[in-house]
Image (spheres, helix red, strand yellow):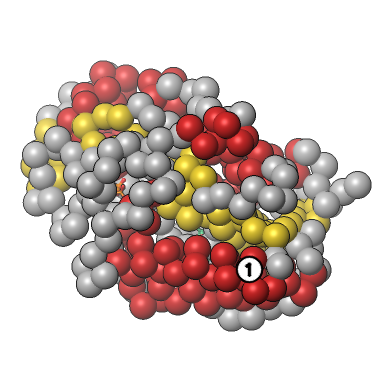
Amino acid sequence: MRKRILVTGGAGFVGSHLCRRLLNEGNDVICLDNFFTGSKENIIDLLPHPYFELIRHDVQEPILLEVDEIYNLACPASPPHYQFDPVATTRTSVLGAINMLDIARKCKAKILQASTSEVYGDPEVHPQPESYRGSVSTTGIRACYDEGKRCAETLFFDYYRQHGVKIKVIRIFNTYGPYMNPDDGRVVSNFIMQALRNQDITIYGAGTQTRSFQYVDDLVEGMIRLMNSDDSFTGPVNIGNPGEFTMLELAQKIITLTGSSSKLTYKPLPQDDPLQRQPDISLAKKELDWEPTIALEEGLKKTIAYFKSLTR
Ligand code: NAD
Ligand code: UDP
C-alpha cells in the first residue's frame, strides 16, 4: 500500500534526497519547508510528480495533516545558519518537535527525529557510543542547536512513554553530498567551492580537529532502515561513517581531487568547536544491519561533480 509520508525540511540538503528516494519507492510524499536554508531548486524535478506535494510552512506553528509516517528534519544544520537567529533555531527544534509529535499522536503515525552527533558536544569519550551522555555547553554559541536537539530527543521519549507514540531517533554524524548549499558554510562545501575557484582554503584553528564524514546516500539508507525497523526499536542510534579525518587531511584530499592551485589560509577556531568526532556504529550494525558503503574519496568525487555543474 502507498504510504503518505511527511518530510519536514524536505527542500534542504538531506530532505531532498530523502523525498526523491521515498517517491521512487512508490510513496505519497508531502514536503514541508519554510525555505530558510532549503530551496525549490533542490526539489524542482519532483514538483511535477503526481504523488509529490509541497507545503510552505514553518514547523514552529501547528499544522494538521493526515499521514502514516513523519521524518522530522526541519532545522538549519550549518553553524553560520543556525547561529544567524539562535532563538528561532531552538524554537524550530523544540516547537517543531512538539507540533510534529502532536500530528503523530493524532494520526497514530510513526515519527523519526533527525537528531545529531552534536548532542555529544565536545566529546570526552572517543568514539562516541549512544550511551555517552555528552559534554555540551549550555551557554555557548552552538547551544541553540545542540540543546534544541537534545530537548527534541527528550520530547520524543516523553511522547513515547506518556502517549504511546511510535518514535525513532537517529543521531546523524557529519554528512555531505550533492544538493548541499554551496554557501552553506559547512566545511565540505566551503573547501570544494574554494578549491574549484582556486581561492585560499579556510582552515579554522590549526586544522587538527577531526570529523567523520558520511556520504548522503548512506545516511538516507540508514534513515529508511530505522523507520522500517521493529516498533520496539526506538534508538537513539548513531548513523555515520567511522572514517575520521583532520580538516588538514580533508583540504589536501579536495585539492588533489579538484587539481586546484589553492593554498591554505588559517582563521580563528570558532568558540566551542568540537576537537574530535567519530561514531561508534555497533548498534546500527546490530539492529539495522547497516554500515556505510561509500568511502570519502568516492563521495567527494560525486560531490565535486555536482558543485562543478553549479559553477558552469
Ligand atoms: P539543511 O539546512 O540543508 O536543511 C534543513 C531544511 O529545514 C531546509 O530546507 C530549511 O529550509 C528547513 N527549515 C529550517 N527551519 C525550518 C522551519 N522552522 N520550518 C520549516 N522548515 C525549516 O540541513 P541538512 O543538512 O539537510 O539537515 C537536515 C536535518 O538533519 C537537520 O535537522 C539537521 O539538524 C540534521 N543533521 C544533519 C547533519 C548533516 O551533516 N547534514 C548532521 C546532523 C544532523
Ligand atoms: N571548518 C574549517 N573551515 C571552514 C568551515 C569549517 O576549518 O571553512 C571546520 C570547523 O571549524 C569544524 C569542521 O571544519 O572544526 C567542521 O565544520 P562544519 O561546520 O562542517 O561542521 P560541525 O562543526 O558542525 O561538525
- From what the image shows, is residue 181 above or below residue 175? below
Relative side of 158 to 210, left or right: right
Front one among 226 and 81: 226
Q: Residue at x 74, y 77 (%)?
A: 64
x and y, in percent, of residue 113 in the image: 56, 57
- From what the image shows, is residue 58 above or below residue 46? below
x and y, in percent, of residue 246 in the image: 21, 32
Give the farthest residue toward the right: 1
As shown in the figure, which amino acid type bears the numbered disc 1? Arg
Front one among 39 and 174: 174
Circle 1 residue = 161
Q: Residue at x 12, y 30 (%)?
A: 263
**What secondary structure is marked by label 1?**
helix
Relative side of 166 to 75, left or right: right
- The mark tally for this picture is 1
Q: Residue 29: in sight, yes or no?
A: yes
- Quadrant in the picture for the C terminus: top left
Q: Residue at x 64, y 66 (%)?
A: 160
Q: Residue 301: in sight, yes or no?
A: no
Relative side of 49 to 31, left or right: right
Residue 40 found in image quarter: bottom right
x and y, in percent, of residue 42 in the image: 56, 49
Please rate how many residues cluster around mark 1, counting C-alpha atoms within 10 Å: few if below 14, some from 14 to 19, many from 20.
few
x and y, in percent, of residue 215 in the image: 47, 32
